[in-house]
Amino acid sequence: MAKNRKLLTAVLGVILSLSLVLQSDIAVYAGEDDGLDDMRGGVASLLNPSVTDSVAIADAMAKELNLELWQEQEAESTLVMANVKSALNVRSDAGEDAEKVGKLYKDCGGVILERKDGWTKLQSGNIVGWASDEFLLFGDEARALANDVGKMIATVNTETLRVRMEPSTEAGVYGLLPKGEIVEVLENDEESGWICIDYNGDDGYVSSEYVNLDFLIDTGETMAEIKAREEAEREAKRHVNYGEYTTDADTLLLLAALIHCEAGGEPYEGQVAVGAVVMNRVRSPAYPDSIHGVIYASGQFTPAMSGKVNRVYESGRIYESCIRAAEEALSGVSNVGDLTHFRRVNGREGLVIGNHVFY
């Protein structure tokens, strides 16, 4: 299936551009690297496209759809990625004096609408506007970053879906997934009709007939979205005093529930590492500065998106080791330094703990 994994990686850039192209065309715009005191976010979006009448976007979509032409003639890709450590201002026109109406964050992507005089008009989520080329990646560099930081997910579209141990209807069953459950895709073998997914740390297999596939990547925020998020975070802080990362019992259990969902089957060191990643994001200016905000940021943690974290939290059936790992992470312990990402081991470089690589 290695060949198919490479094929999946090759087309992710195309899928990403197509998905981003079809986002709603609410008018907002682009800019330069900002100061640390004005950098918050890291919110991502699940790219479920909507219809738009924009001629420029339609042309870009048609171009990206023609995969064969794109491969054979090396046509210029419409994908663009932010190349910043924290945040990139989005402005109303191609100039640093134009109104700031949105932001792109580290690892955010978009689609090119127009380019002129060292500036690019792009679309990312609900943002449409101009950004300086100095802080953007294009072509192969943009695709490489998108494939590295994005991920493919599958949403179950049938009432109950069996997760097999091997890609065969004769194979044993790990368990069942309910309708609407979202899982990360590790491999998509189109010829066989089977998809390899991450099932509680194991490689599970489901029929491609019973899932919908989407590509997940960070997109920017409009100024209105930033304002709404910051207000929600201020409201949350009224009930929680982090101080030296101390918090109430409910937030402790919420963090433990996420660790349970993401690393319940991992060694204890892996559970602490997941908790440390959450706390590293809380400390980072590129992400929301609350535990609740980090866990529920759109597109960040699949179990939070699918509602699994809520179900585990409400049930109270959380592994004791995950609660201890949450307590350690909240106390400031980190066995992954200041790393803020992790995924199933897939050959990428990073710190490997159990079945996860942290980077």
Image: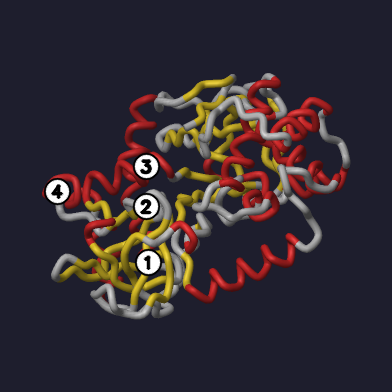
- Label 3 with label 1: CB-CB less than 8 Å: no
Neighbor class of circle 4 (other Cα within 10 Å; few <14, some 14-19, many 20+) is few
Give the distance between the C-alpha atoms of the residues marked 1 and 4, in whole angstroms: 30 Å
Q: Give the residue pinned by disc 1.
A: 89
Q: Is residue 123 positioned above or below 47 on the image?
A: below
On the question of residue 13 being in view, the answer is yes
- Label 4 vs label 3: CA separation? 18 Å
Query: Mark 3, mark 1: which one is toward the viewer?
Result: 1
Q: Amino acid at mark 2?
A: Ile
Amino acid type, callout 3: Asn
Q: CA distance from mark 3 to mark 2?
A: 10 Å
- SS at badge 1: strand
First in sequence: mark 1 vs mark 4: 4
Q: Nearer the viewer, residue 228 or 123?
A: 228
Tell me, for residue 254, which label it has, or none: none
| Residue 279 percent coordinates (x, y) | 63, 41
Mark 3 is surrounded, within 10 Å at the Cα level, by few (under 14), some (14 to 19) or many (20 or more) other residues, namely: many
Image point (33%, 32%), residue name: 6
Query: Foreground: 113 or 119?
Result: 119
Which comes sooner in the sequence, label 4 or label 2?
2
Q: Is residue 103 above or below residue 246?
A: below
Query: Which element is circle 3 on?
Result: helix
Q: Are marks 3 and 2 in contact (CB under 8 Å)?
A: no
User: What type is the residue that disc 4 sits on?
Assistant: Glu
Q: At 77% from the left edge and 45% from the top edge, which residue is drawn? A: 254
Instruction: Identify which residue is drawn at 40% across, 25% down.
Output: 349
In the picture, the disc for residue 15 is: 2
> SS of the residue at dot 2?
helix
Find disc 3 in the rendering and name its residue: 147
Distance between the alpha carbons at the discs numbered 4 and 2: 16 Å
Identify residue for label 4.
74
